[in-house]
Amino acid sequence: MVEMNGSQALWESLMKEGAKNVFGLPGGSVIPLCDEMLKQDIRFILARHEQGAAHMADGYARASGEVGVCLATSGPGATNLITGIASANIDSSPVVALCGQVARELIGTDAFQEVDIIGVSASVTKYNIQTRSAAEIPYAVKTAFQIANTGRKGAVLIDLPKDVTTEIMDVKFPENIVFRGYHPVYQPDRREIEWAATLLARADKPVIIAGGGIISSGASQELVSLSEYLMAPTAITLMGKGAFPADHPLSLGLCGMHGTCAANTMVSEADVLLIIGARLTDRTTGSVKTFAPNAKIIHIDIDRSEIDKNIDTVTRVIGDAKISLQKILHHLSILRSSTATNDVWRKKCQELREVNGVSKTNGDYLKAPEVVKTLRKALARDSIVTTEVGQCQMWAALHYDAYLPRTFLTSGGLGTMGWGFPAAIGAKAAKPNVTVVDIAGDGSFGMTENNLATSVKEDLPVIVMILNNNMLGMVAQWQRLFFGHRYSAVELKKTPDFVKLAQAYGAEGVRVESYQELEAAIRRAIKSEIATVIDVPIDPEENVLPIVPPGMGLKDALMEA
Amino acid sequence: MSKDNIIAFLVEDKPGVLFNISNMFRRRGFNINSISVGNAEDTGISRMTITIDAEGRSLNQVVEQLDKMVDVIEVKRLDKLRTVIRELMLVKLRTIDPMAREEALGYINSNHGLILDIEPESIIAEVTGEPEKLDNFLEQVKSIGIVEMSRTGITALEKGQLKLKRSELNG
Ligand SMILES: Cc1ncc(C[n+]2csc(CCOP(=O)(O)OP(=O)(O)O)c2C)c(N)n1
């Protein structure tokens, strides 16, 4: 027991959890916390909007595998965090959000800047806690980190009434918290492993779909071993990008609505489909009626509630992806199944990999896929890419080759425009020596561009490459393809001038008109000590292809439009 | 009711837990027919019993989504054949007419009900039993005139060795 105030208890607890950075923006209810922070060895990164702070914490978490921490004041500060918290939670990213709150005696009175953030955040967090005394703070922090970063990871919010942060009490720091109702399962059941291995050993046309669970559990190596052992072509979900090296001969690329021809065809024709650490949303499966119609489906996930939620499986494995894959590999070696050699199947994989979607384009604009490939060539293998949302995101997913886990970060479940730039800043804080690039759309970047101030002033230089089509491009694409080419509320009319905008913040801004200029600009930006915005004008009418029209199956993709 | 499935679960007895559970039901579109809450045998733990008109995948989802919640300690779908099920109901009947009163008392007695209050114009009866029994009773007294009523929703315990809480629970 040590006597201290609640704020001190908070910072000490955070440091015991290994937190090194906090992203946030203060206000009345957290002034005591910020004051106490001056004495602590922790880096506070000042965002210019709390949504940005939450995305930074999320980007930090995804790049590092550690918990990201963000902080906001009560009321509007806390509600501004919500989009960021929801984006992190649905993508199983471990984030702890600290929110100020009005003093205990004012709670429930509609006091100034009081919002019931526990109620508001309930549906978009894995857990949330309101501390009712200073002595509860170390327990709350320990609980938050434990829950955020175990099992299926997620976001946890702590609500901190102002007088709790100033109250002086005897405080104890718990080593570990035992929950009566929370026991993540890591070790898979032996029978489930055996059954899964047996089905895989018998497969003639096996395919694997790898999701974000591979990255979260650090199972990429095991995934590659299993793919090679079975000679199973391997697709990824959007969240799984980086889980399987894109230049591996068995790599099929992205599966789903904007999936590659190779991934969607092979998944549709598989006789055994192994899905690892993926939620199988509508964006991955297309119409569930025609999803992998001939396949026996095996689903490995740490979250039991995901099994049979959207797609019926033949067998399941509940547990950690890495441990499960190790055990399946071990069991396969006992079965001594002759390593599969369906040459026709693998040849098909090779052939389909050459098939790409083709968009009509006007004039001599740079082509988005080529722009993305130019970026890839200029970057190192371990560089980190984040994305905004829309066509830019899908071009990145289709054409940016990611080789390593935690090098391709994107808002998958929520598709939050404005996520990529602050997430890039968070990733840079986690990996200061790695180049970090946000592949952006002009619409998305506009949503959180004010974080240029953070990037410049906090010395977290990242690169923003805008695929500037002057449009809310993805919406415009749907209007072209599915709404008789009628544009409604999508034209951005060349505002703002992103070069001048960057310069106004003290960042570099450059517009490029050719692939050579682009490559040169990227190379300069990599060396630059300040954030760089590279504005790349592209055709407003360029489509991202393939696309599976809404409600259709994976085999019904449009390849040209 | 007879089609309904019964799920019983233990939860941490702390503020906000009931909100979180009903919020989850709402968010996922689960349609709960009845819900009852009270203390369980251990301090700090509440026991909830719900009935739900769902089967197959969606029933499974209710169980899994509950199980996933941090403050839910144990969840189980109860097998009706091996479970004792009870519901309590209070009914206020209009009994100004002496004949009606006579008739009401007869139904209450034959259902092993209790009379909790007698006023010149009405009586309050308590009837306990399986929900079907309460439904039947209501059918019987309908013509007498129901002023108001309140049902608790069912509560249930498994028979014999069966138990909701696994003994090896830590903490
Ligand atoms: C916060 C938010 N608002 C709206 C949407 C809907 N939406 C999805 S993509 C898109 C267009 C994005 O435009 P831009 O960032 O310019 O990217 P592009 O599609 O042109 O590459 C919109 C509006 C969203 N995903 N997120």
Image (spheres, coloured by chain):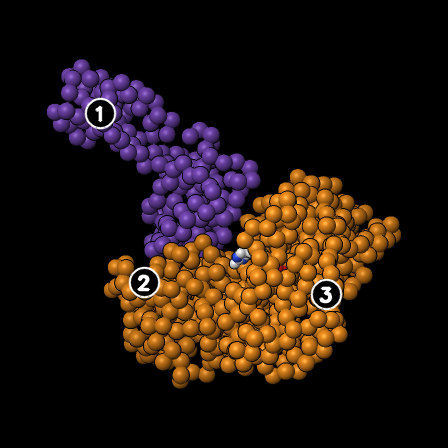
Chain colours: A orange, B purple
Image quadrant of residue B86? top left
Image quadrant of residue B71? bottom left
Q: Earlier in the sequence, mark 2 or mark 3?
A: 2
Q: Quick check: marks 3 and 1 in contact, CB under 8 Å?
A: no
Q: Quick check: marks 2 and 1 in contact, CB under 8 Å?
A: no
Compared to A134, does A413 lie above or below? above
- Other-residue count near label 1 (Cα within 10 Å), few / some / many at <14 / 14–19 / ≥20: many
Mark 1 falls within which chain?
Answer: B
Q: State the CA–CA distance, disc 2 to disc 3.
A: 50 Å
Looking at the rendered image, the quarter that the N terminus of chain A falls into is bottom left
- Other-residue count near label 2 (Cα within 10 Å), few / some / many at <14 / 14–19 / ≥20: many
Which residue is denoted by mark 2 in the rendering? A114
Which residue is denoted by mark 1 in the rendering? B93
Which residue is denoted by mark 3 in the rendering? A366
Q: Residue at x 42, y 78 (%)?
A: A12
Q: Amino acid at mark 2?
A: Glu
